[in-house]
Amino acid sequence: MMQTKTDHFTDEDTEAAIAYLSGTAPRNSIFDRSGVVEIYENELAAFHGRKICILMSSGTAALYSAFFCVGIRSGTNVVGPALTFMTTVTPAALLGAEVRLVDCEAETCNISHAGIEEAIDANTRAIIFTNMFGHPCNVAVLREIASRHGLPLIEDNSLAIGAVRDGYLTGSSADLVAFSLGSTKLFSGGQGGGLLCDDPDYADRALLLGHFGQRAQIQCSKVASRSHAYCGYGLNFRMHVLAAAISRARFADRERLFAARRKRYEIVAERLKEFDALRLPVETEEVTRGAWQGYVVSLREPSITLRTQMIAALSKCGPFAKFGLYYPSLARSLSLYKNQVQSMGKLSGANQAERFSFSISPMTVEKIEDVESAADQLYDVLAPIFQ
């Protein structure tokens, strides 16, 4: 039976946790950077070609740290995507900044380059982007825009670890990279996240923010930073060691997990490819999707009639497929921050994606025969609409 939004812990996850608890895997103090935390951070940094990785309690904590590192505060603004998970931008709003929401591209749901240019003003302090549903943004273009305006570029890579576009590995090029290692993510340890960067000043600020005490005292690069290490800014953003142990074991098995998720999405694509009215996720020669968190199918041309029919049909598919995206457009979901959120233009791309798309449950461990059965059912309920 297909399920969704569950932990999906496997026998391998249990083995990783037991290995840590039994002492057969490297142990560490919760107060410093040692054992499994140190090893995993080094592995993540090396994989992405970065100098520094700091494991976090969640992707949200990593994003908050990234905005804090670049000085986001009241009187500043951040330019970011209208279509993404809310915590891509809510930490910036919590720090007091205005969030300027930019529309998305129709085919990829990634942030519009032209929209970024129009949103930047004298108070802009950062640009943030998300590699939506596993499809890498054109980071070369984004870096050029950020460099030309003298702005740090922040990447939310929660949905696309291991993805490549035009030779650029996601997470390898932005000034700061935040990602989730929790929820239904491919490398989930139950809960967790990480922050990547090369600048030791950013690392010092992140350590003082959420890793005060012994770790900040040992790792901060500047004497001035170390003088505040005992209490820092007083937040605890440390990733739990058991979560780190489970996530690390999954990351070590990443090529198999990448292939497992791709195989399951390919089963869905095979069933839907004959429906010309549907736009399936883009796979081009220059793109490899890696973790590929999210499979979204949309109508090529908006149609209220087809939308109504799809809503009724997909209600028969249970958790495998649901009408709409995994989360709503930020323009209508950030109610507590409504005075700090500005939509740049009509956001027609984001609104269309939200109103005329359906999403497939992220899959990795589901049995192939269960996926095939669910995909067959999906085909059967959609065929009367599109054939």
Image: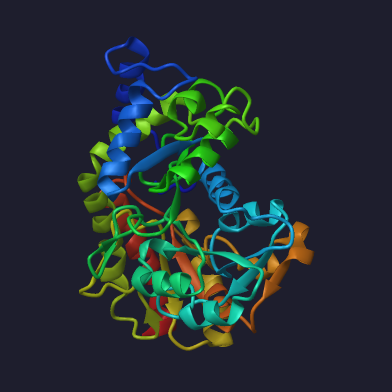
Measured along the vertical axis of the image, is residue 258 above or below residue 125? above
Q: Residue at x 50, y 24 (%)?
A: 217
The residue lying toward the viewer, choosing from 71 and 26, is 71
Q: Position of residue 252 (x, y in %)?
A: 24, 37
Q: Can you see residue 155?
A: yes
Q: Is residue 77 left or right of residue 104?
A: right
Q: Is residue 334 left or right of residue 134?
A: right
The furthest residue to the front:
223
Q: Can you see residue 309?
A: no
Q: Position of residue 142 (x, y in %)?
A: 42, 71
Q: Position of residue 99 (x, y in %)?
A: 66, 65
Q: Quadrant of residue 143?
A: bottom left
Q: How many marks?
A: 0
The furthest residue to the top:
22
Q: Position of residue 218 (x, y in %)?
A: 45, 24
Measured along the vertical axis of the image, is residue 257 above or below residue 355? above
Measured along the vertical axis of the image, is residue 208 above or below residue 305? above
The residue lying toward the viewer, choosing from 109 and 4, is 109
The residue lying toward the viewer, choosing from 207 and 63, is 207
Q: How is the image coloured?
A: rainbow
Quadrant for the C terminus, please.
bottom left
Q: Residue at x 45, y 21 (%)?
A: 32
Q: Residue at x 31, y 41 (%)?
A: 44
The residue lying toward the viewer, choosing from 341 and 386, is 341
Measured along the vertical axis of the image, is residue 40 above or below residue 67? above
Q: Is residue 294 left or right of residue 368?
A: right
Q: Residue at x 58, y 70 (%)?
A: 82
